[in-house]
Image (cartoon, rainbow, N blue to C red):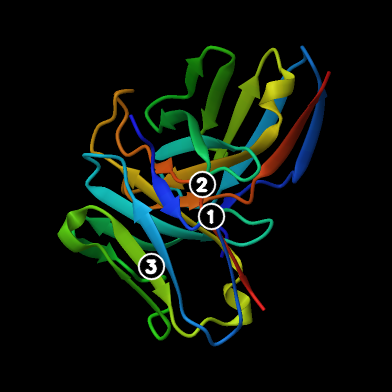
């Protein structure tokens, strides 16, 4: 079974430029999460989707960040314009109501996109 | 406001000995807890979980203990192996959907 796929793995941009990240969740997982992880910190939730609906975007800086999950499958996260403080690893995760381990809501993470804003 | 705290940024243990990683939380409404392991340049991978109705869950070399009165959980790895060297994150949830992560503990198992 393929895991969560994210691209690109690395991105270097200058401040004020736009950037986009892409995520393809595990097949059949209806819940998709975008996290930001700063150096030395744990992941912090930006937005959570249930199918194509954003059900929790309270931590998403909406002035510059946007996300979409068309058709309830893959998702994109965009930053426009990027700022120096946006440098971080952006992680995508997905989950189902029940996993093969029998425990609910275990999140499976992609490898992340490391963004450097210069 | 950090609701989940891992106060030890790093831990070194000899191979074969026990590793104990600690995690504290502040929200008494949390009812589900997980541990994730992260290798460099990879995303976190699920390790073990525990519901608040239990105080212990075991999976092979990994055991998680939950002390609700102290709002504390710990992960025990025994025996520790060099391949266990990674960053370990604990996470907690009160809805089953939104998880709050600690800052991680970097474990080094010395051969």
Q: Residue at x 36, y 71 (%)?
A: A58
Tell me where residue A21 sits by quadrant: bottom left
Query: Is A89 on the left or on the right of B79, as rendered?
Result: left
Residue B18 to residue A110: above or below: above
Q: Which mark is residue A9?
A: 1
The x and y percentages for residue B47 are 50, 29
Q: Residue furthest left?
A: A71
Q: Residue at x 65, y 20 (%)?
A: B77
The x and y percentages for residue A50 are 21, 55
Viewport quadrant of the N terminus of chain B = bottom right
Tag 2 and tag 1, C-beta contact below 8 Å:
yes
Tell me where residue B82 sits by quadrant: top right
At label 1, counting other C-alpha atoms closer than 10 Å, the crowd grade (few under 14, some 14-19, many 20 or more) is some
Secondary element at image label 3: strand
Q: Residue at x 77, y 12 (%)?
A: B16
Rounded to the nearest angstrom, the CA distance separating label 3 from label 1 is 14 Å
The x and y percentages for residue B40 are 66, 42
| Pointer 2 chain | A
**Can you see residue A7?**
yes
In this figure, which residue is indicated by the disc labeled 2? A111
Circles 2 and 1 on the same chain: yes
**Can you see residue B68?**
no
Rounded to the nearest angstrom, the CA distance separating label 3 from label 2 is 15 Å
In this figure, which residue is indicated by the disc labeled 3? A77
At label 2, counting other C-alpha atoms closer than 10 Å, the crowd grade (few under 14, some 14-19, many 20 or more) is many
Rounded to the nearest angstrom, the CA distance separating label 2 from label 1 is 8 Å
């Amino acid at each position: 079974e393929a895991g969560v796929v994210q691209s690109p793995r690395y991105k270097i941009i200058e401040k004020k430029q736009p950037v986009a990240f892409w995520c393809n969740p595990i097949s059949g997982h209806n819940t998709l999460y975008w996290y930001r992880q700063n150096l030395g910190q744990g992941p912090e939730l930006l937005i959570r989707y249930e199918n194509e609906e954003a059900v929790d975007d309270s931590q998403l800086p909406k002035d510059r960040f946007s996300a979409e999950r068309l058709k309830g499958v893959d998702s994109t996260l965009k930053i426009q314009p990027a700022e120096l403080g946006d440098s971080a690893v952006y992680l995508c995760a997905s989950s189902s109501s029940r996993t093969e381990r029998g425990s609910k809501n275990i999140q499976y993470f992609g490898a992340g996109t490391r963004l450097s804003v210069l | 406001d950090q609701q989940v705290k891992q106060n030890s940024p790093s831990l070194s243990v000899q191979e074969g000995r026990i590793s104990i990683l600690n995690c504290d939380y502040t929200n008494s409404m949390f009812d589900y807890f997980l541990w994730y392991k992260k290798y460099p340049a990879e995303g976190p991978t699920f390790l073990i979980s525990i519901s608040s109705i239990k105080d212990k869950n075991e999976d092979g070399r990994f055991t998680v203990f939950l002390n609700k009165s102290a709002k504390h959980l710990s992960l025990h790895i025994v025996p520790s192996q060099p391949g266990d060297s990674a960053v370990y994150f604990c996470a907690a949830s009160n809805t089953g959907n939104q998880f709050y992560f600690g800052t991680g503990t970097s474990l080094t198992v010395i051969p």
